[in-house]
Image (spheres, grey):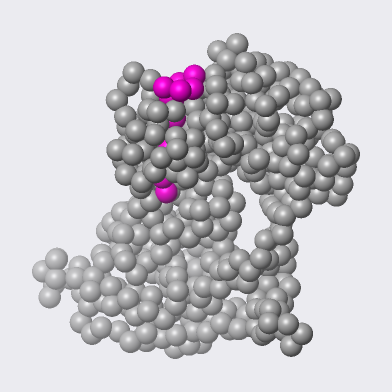
Amino acid sequence: MDASVIDRLAQARVVVGGDVLLDRFVEGKVGRVSPEAPVAVLNHRAERLLLGGAGNVAANLVAFGAQAVLIGVAGDDTAADDIRTLCASVDALDCQLITDPSRPTTVKTRYLSGWHQLLRVDSEDASPLAAAVAASVIAAVEAALDGAGALILSDYAKGVLDAATIPALIALARGRGIPVIVDPKKASADVFAGATLLTPNADEMARFAGMVVASDAEAEAAGRKVLDAVSIEAILVTRGDRGMTLCRRGEPVLHVPAETHRVFDVTGAGDTVVAALAAALAAGLVLPEAVRVANAAAGVAVTKPGTATVSPTELKQALGIAGAANVMTPADARDQVEAWHRQGLRVGFTNGCFDLLHRGHLHSLDQAARRVDRLVVGVNSDDSARRLKGAGRPVQDLDTRAAVLAALKPVDLVVPFDEDTPAALIEAIAPDTLFKGADYTEAEVVGGDFVKARGGRVELLPLLPGHSTTSTLARLSGRS
């Protein structure tokens, strides 16, 4: 698979129908227990609103570069206004919310200390839609299918997808030769008859098949059992750290191992999977290729907090058709560091040319990483290194230097910069600690005043004598 495959996702146009939610995050820090009751006291700091449910599926599609039409139902309330505002801020997303004044917009409110979830409060009415509202949903999807390459049914069991709407929507799409991908929450697979692909997780698959789904063999057996009973072309069982299992009629089973990442949060990973599958199929990929793309996308999504999206660059990196995933632009690095800070993690920063990596570099990076939770390394671009070190430098180009640094265990993130100093980068990412070698004084450390003004600190690390790039080059040239 090459990079052009991921670039083709931008050609996809996908309709998403289902339960549109508003995800509300109330963030703060717990420092004490209430004297009134044995409960934590959350010191409120901020709130965030994100598209959830089918909305997060649509957001994932747009993040891949695809066009998305989002169709769902909302109440006549401020939460519906918030969803429309969020959608309006996303290019290539056409949001068509049908108003039902008889029910509230579904809102999930999560209270967080750092990124530890203390409590979730749901506001919802999951009863079936009134006949007139259901008819409006069906009509909206029918109109949106013109020019679409796939239809996603995003079922969060909030009432939009039921025994009346599901068969009608599947028939509309399949009648036009458009694949239907379903993320199901129903007790039985029967209601999804006629769909192209179901994407149940292991628990949902066990419920459909009435059997345990743990091993590869059990996942295959469950998939075959449901395919024998229900008119569905294929089933993709998503199995968390055990990967995915694809069962198709008349085809060998395909087991895809999970991407090996540090899992931070699985919230919304299913949305990422179904969005990637639909975008890939709409762009002309065959189903096994689409599954591999979706598996890679899920591997990225679970490393991020909350309902998160995956960019084409991240997807290419996860598939091994682009540079290392932890080499980022300053803008992306800022977002990553902000996410780490929301988790309550301490972030350190150091920088250099790292032209010929040697034992002294490794010693310093290891010492720095031991003092913080995450270590960011700024690396001078080729032009910047040349201005700093002189003609003939750097010996190795930026891509090579960044890739080598990114592969080191102590390094969590590598950020190239073009300026002569990392001052602008430091101000963009706002680390908690700056590290430099003990050959500097604290007053000489670029960005030190900025970090200390924010309550951070500067640490000077002891050097390992006898190791430097200059001395290594001198030995190579026979000068010493």
In which quarter of the view is residue 470 placed?
A: bottom left
Whether residue 268 is situated above or below residue 114 in the rendered picture: above
Q: Is residue 84 left or right of residue 370?
A: right
Counting from the top left corner in percent of width and height, residue 430 is at: 57, 71
* Left or right, 3 with reference to 404: right
Q: Residue 192: give x, y in percent of width and height.
A: 57, 26
Q: Is residue 66 visible?
A: yes
Q: Residue at x 33, y 87 (%)?
A: 462
Name the side, left or right, on which 38 lies relative to 341: right
> Going 14% across and 66% down the picture, which residue do you hit?
476
Near-viewer residue (146 or 470): 146
> What span is in magenta?
227-240
Question: Residue 240 at what x, y percent from top left?
Answer: 42, 49
Q: Is residue 76 above or below residue 247?
A: below
Residue in view at x 65 percent, y 76 percent? 29
Of residue 233 and residue 371, the one placed in the foreground of this image is: 233
User: Taking the image as drawn, is residue 391 in sight?
Assistant: no
Q: Nearer the viewer, residue 478 or 60?
A: 60
**Relative to residue 103, is residue 302 depicted above or below?**
below
Number of numbered tags placed on the structure image:
0
Say which residue appears at 25% left-offset and 65% top-offset: 356
Residue 236 belongs to the span the image colors magenta: yes
Front one among 129 and 391: 129
* x, y percent for residue 473: 20, 68
The quarter of the image holding the N terminus is top left
Magenta highlight on residue 52:
no
- The picture quadrant where one finds residue 152 is top right
- Quadrant for the C terminus, please: bottom left
